[in-house]
Image (cartoon, rainbow, N blue to C red):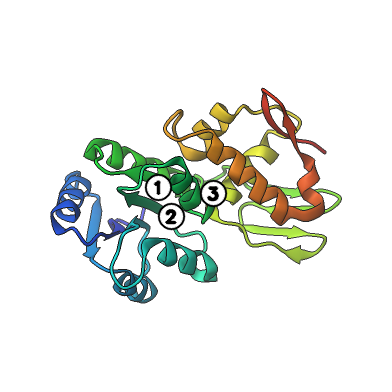
Amino acid sequence: MSGQPTRILVVEDEQDIAGLIKHTLERPGEVQVDIVGSGDVALRTITDTPPDLVILDLNLPVVSGIEVCRILRGRPATAQLPIIMLTARTSEADRVSGLDLGADDYVTKPFSLRELAARVRAVLRRRAPAADGEDKGAVYRGAHLVADFDWVSIQVDGEPIRLTRREFDLLRCLVENKNRVLSRDRLLERVWGYDRSIETRSVDVHVGRLRSKLGAAGQQIETLVGLGYRFVE
């Protein structure tokens, strides 16, 4: 451990909400929370001092949260920066749209501060490096796909493929359990960090995007109707 606190950037223009989030997350003493109130300032702040995680409201002045997420996912330096979206929008279409852009999670207002803190911990837990001796040499080599999970390097037919962090974690979970059927609930638990907290529809969205990006290798991800998904060799 470096001894340095985990840095979280809260991008929220409602200062009372931002203050409550900051107080809740900083209470254990292991987290430092910074607050900005607009999308343009968020982008500058993240570029200058990248945080460990971003809590991003969608309804922001100047640059919307959706656009901030799109820009961050398009930049190599922040393509896998953990992002939790925070918004008053409650429709499934909005949630799927946010997750489809590459957000790691989606929390709707009004929300429980304890639940938000739990989701933050879950995202950071998935982001944490493996312990010494764990998952060393985690490389998969197939006819089309070469995936080095330690070095976060994915190639299909020799060409590098850029995945969001969620897509990367999903691929890793499927590959590590190759030839085994994983239900949507199991994928939610293993990849998202908890079960039944978001719609299983988001699993389908991410699998579809992952298949598309993997091209020929995407055929190795099988759908078993009523059961889930399986990565086959």
Marks 3 and 1, how far apart in space?
13 Å
Precedes in sequence: disc 3 or disc 1: 1
> Front-most of 52 and 216?
216
Q: Residue at x 63, y 62 (%)?
A: 162
Looking at the rendered structure, the secondary structure element under dot 2 is: loop
Q: Residue at x 76, y 48 (%)?
A: 218
Q: Position of residue 145 (x, y in %)?
A: 78, 53
Looking at the rendered structure, the secondary structure element under dot 3 is: helix
Q: Mark 2 points at which residue?
A: 82
Q: Name the residue under label 1.
A: 124
Residue 179, disc: none
Q: How crowded is mark 2: few (under 14 residues within 10 Å), some or many (20 or more)?
A: many
Q: Which of the 4 quarters of the picture holds residue 181?
A: top right
For residue 120, say whether it is visible: no
Q: Position of residue 28 (x, y in %)?
A: 20, 44
Q: Position of residue 190 (x, y in %)?
A: 53, 34
Precedes in sequence: disc 3 or disc 2: 2
For residue 111, say whether it is visible: yes
The answer to whether the residue labelled 1 contacts the one labelled 2, judged by CB atoms less than 8 Å apart, is yes
Residue kind at label 1, given as amino acid type: Leu
* 20 relative to 108 in the view: left or right: left
Residue kind at label 3, given as amino acid type: Arg
Q: Residue at x 24, y 37 (%)?
A: 112
Q: Residues within 10 Å of mark 3 (few under 14, many from 20)?
A: many
- Mark 3 or 1: the one toward you: 3
Precedes in sequence: disc 1 or disc 2: 2
> Front-most of 139 and 50?
50
Residue 166, disc: 3
> Front-most of 66 and 124?
66
Rendered-image quadrant of the C terminus: top right
